[in-house]
Image (cartoon, helix red, strand yellow):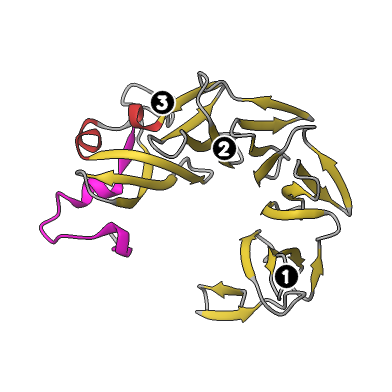
Amino acid sequence: MAYIYDSNNERFTRVPTPSGFGTAVAINDTGHVIGLGEAEGPARPYLYDGHASRDLSGSLGWAFGINNADTVVGYGVDGRPVMLQGGSVTPLSSQPGQAYAINDHGQIAGSLTDRPFLYSDGRLQVLDTGGQPGQARDVNERGWVVGTLGDGSADTPFLYRDGVLRDLNTLLTPRADAAWNLLEGNAINDRGWIVGAGSLNGSDRRAFVAIPVPEPSAAVLMLAGLGLVGAAARGRRRACNMARGCRIS
C-alpha cells in the first residue's frame, strides 16, 4: 500500500492508488504524490492530488519525479525520457532513457542509455563524463546535479555544478577521505547536502550525508569540500551506526 507520512502530527495517510495497491515514489511541497499502482499486471504510474489518484499509464510507462507545478517526469510508453505537464507529454530526446528528477525551474536530470543528462531551457545536454557510463539522479533549484558513474563494478558519485563535473571523492575533507570511499550519489537539496552510499573503512555499503563546508577565505558559502556526517561520528565517544539512522548532535 502507498502512504504519506506527516511528521508534524506523526500521521499516516493512505494514498488511494487506481488499482488499490502500489508504492509512492515522490512527493512535492503541496503533498501531491506520484507512484506506481500494481494489481495482477504491469505497474501503472499515477498522480495523487490530495483527493484522488489519476492513472497516467496512457501517457507514461514509469514516473520518477514531480515538481511543485505537478510536472511529472519519467519515461514514456515508447521508452523515451519525457515530462508530463497538464496532460501534454513532451519527449526530451529521440533516444531511449529515463528522466529521474525535475526542479521548479523545469530543469530535469536523467540518463540516455547510461549517459547522464541535464535538460534545461528546452535543451538536453549530455554531461561530459570522459566516456564513462552513468546516470544523473537528482537536480536542486540551483541546477546542481548529482548521480553515479560506472557500470556497477567500480562506481563513483558525481556532482555537476556550473558546467563542471566532479567526482565527490575528490571533494572530501582529509578526515573524511581517509575513512570513506563514496560509491553512489542519489539526491541533493537546495543547501547542497548530498545523500548516497559508500564504504566506511572498507565496510559494506553505508548511507552518507555529505555537507558542503565554507571556504575560509570566501565571503560566501562555497563547495570547498564535503564533510561527511559518518566520518564525524567516528570521533564521538559513543559509537554510532549511521546505517541505522543515529542522530549526531
SS of the residue under disc 1: loop
29 and 24: which one is in front?
A: 24
Q: Which segment is the magenta one?
A: 225-246
- The amino acid marked with disc number 2 is Ala
- Asked whether residue 239 is drawn in magenta, I would say yes
Q: Earlier in the sequence, mark 3 or mark 2?
A: 2
- The amino acid marked with disc number 1 is Gly
Marks 1,3: beta carbons within 8 A: no
Residue 31 in the image: x percent, y percent? 67, 66
Mark 1 neighbour density, 10 Å: few (under 14) some (14–19) many (20 or more): few
Q: Nearer the viewer, mark 1 or mark 3?
A: 1
Q: Which residue is mark 3?
A: 219
Q: Is residue 161 left or right of residue 244?
A: right
**Residue 237 visible in rendering:** yes
**Residue 102 visible in rendering:** no
Q: Is residue 8 left or right of residue 18?
A: left
Give the number of the disc on residue 136.
2
- Asked whether residue 76 is drawn in magenta, I would say no
SS of the residue under disc 3: loop
Q: Earlier in the sequence, mark 1 or mark 3?
A: 1
Query: Residue 194: which quarter of the image?
Result: top left
